[in-house]
Image: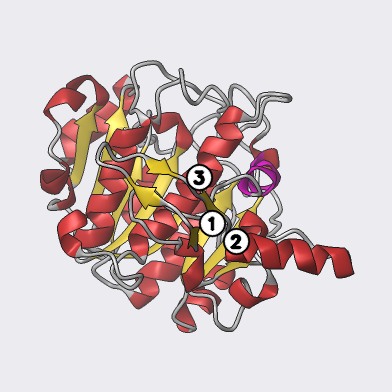
Amino acid sequence: MLNSGAITGNGCWQHGSHVSEARILAVAAKTKKATQLSFFGLPEEHSNEETSQAVIIPAPYENTTSYGRGTKNGPKAILDASQQVELFDDELWVEPYRVGIHSGAEVKMAPVVSETEAPFQELTDAVKAQLSRGKFPIVLGGEHALSIGPVRACMERYPDLSILQVDAHADMRKSYDGNAYSHASVSYHLYKMLPKPALTNVGVRNISAEEVEWMEQEQPNVKIFWARQQKTWNFQEIVNTLSDNVYLTIDVDGLDSSIMPSTGTPEPGGMDWYQLMDLIKTVCVRKNVVAADIVELSPIPKLHGPDFLVAKLLYKLIGYKFALELGVSKKYL
């Protein structure tokens, strides 16, 4: 809801203020009784499980992080930061929360090792349940290895599923530090799981000799868009490498370390905010993004900027996914 304001000729908003109806309702609810914190501070009206179209599934799983640790604290940090996210999207000119955003139950999992028969089954079951109800599930990690769980759920429903990955690393090792289900091996296993293997990784700037050798020998259907070539990227061409139904996995280390220092394996030379937004917007408009995850945030105490960045990234993803349904004209996307 926009109150007594107008857009000036130079695109500035004057003589008014934005007061979110949802935030007013949420504050009113909190004055009556203490309630469990919901993502973005949404009241029951806009966050109940039955009517919400987007469902956020926190998964504070951490087992194989190999440099900086702390990804298990990611979901809570994102939840806390989301309370400060403005609910009106100044790009889409809508309030994405109106599609309903439910804060799902936290999924806890025991450490997964190479001998595990059905790794991350708890997460598979949680995502499968939401897909069966027509929801858009978004998993918040946690380390990147957990993507195996939701991808397994999606590929059972969408046999043509392809994966769009944002990552600083190729993650194509068969195993790492003796664990096949390491965060450094997730892309290899995701690729092997798919009925019609197709994986596109954007923002890579770190790859091992082992991974290069495997890719040269196997010639897998893996497309890598190197960060060093980002000035030549065409996001429509990137998205054209994917099938109609897409799983989106975002490792926050795909972003440049100057804006995302809060991750276990930061790398310089990564994507900036608007590049990531353009990529997500393009895939959401041109393909059917069936589910997503955002992983590898390792919060740094008293440094809230990266936590807020991920919270806003989460909200933007929901806005792009439901932009047409929210009434955004396709010509603006």
Label whose residue precedes the other's in the sequence (2 or 3): 2
Q: Position of residue 182 (x, y in %)?
A: 52, 39
Whether residues under marks 2 and 3 lie with C-beta atoms below 8 angstroms apart, the answer is no
Q: Position of residue 24 (x, y in %)?
A: 68, 63
Magenta part of the protein: which range? 74-82
Disc 3 target residue: 312
The secondary structure type at the circle numbered 2 is strand
Q: Please tell me which residue lies in front, 136 or 277.
A: 277
The secondary structure type at the circle numbered 3 is helix
Q: Position of residue 57 (x, y in %)?
A: 60, 61
Amino acid type at mark 1: Val
Q: Nearer the viewer, mark 2 or mark 3?
A: 3
The C terminus, quarter of image: bottom left
Identity of the residue drawn at 43% across and 52% down: 5
Amino acid type at mark 2: Ile
Q: Classify mark 3: residues with Cα within 10 Å, few (<14), some (14-19) or many (20+).
A: many
Corner quadrant of residue 242: bottom left
Label whose residue precedes the other's in the sequence (1 or 3): 1
Q: Which mark is residue 166?
A: none
Q: CA distance from mark 1 to mark 3?
A: 15 Å
Disc 1 target residue: 139
Corner quadrant of residue 33: bottom right
Amino acid type at mark 3: Lys
Residue sitting farthest toward the right:
33
Q: Let me know if residue 163 is in the magenta part.
A: no
Q: Position of residue 274 (x, y in %)?
A: 32, 35
Disc 2 target residue: 57
304 horizontally vs 178: left or right: right
The secondary structure type at the circle numbered 1 is strand
Query: Please, what is the dominant secondary structure of the magenta stretch?
Result: helix
Q: Nearer the viewer, mark 1 or mark 3?
A: 3
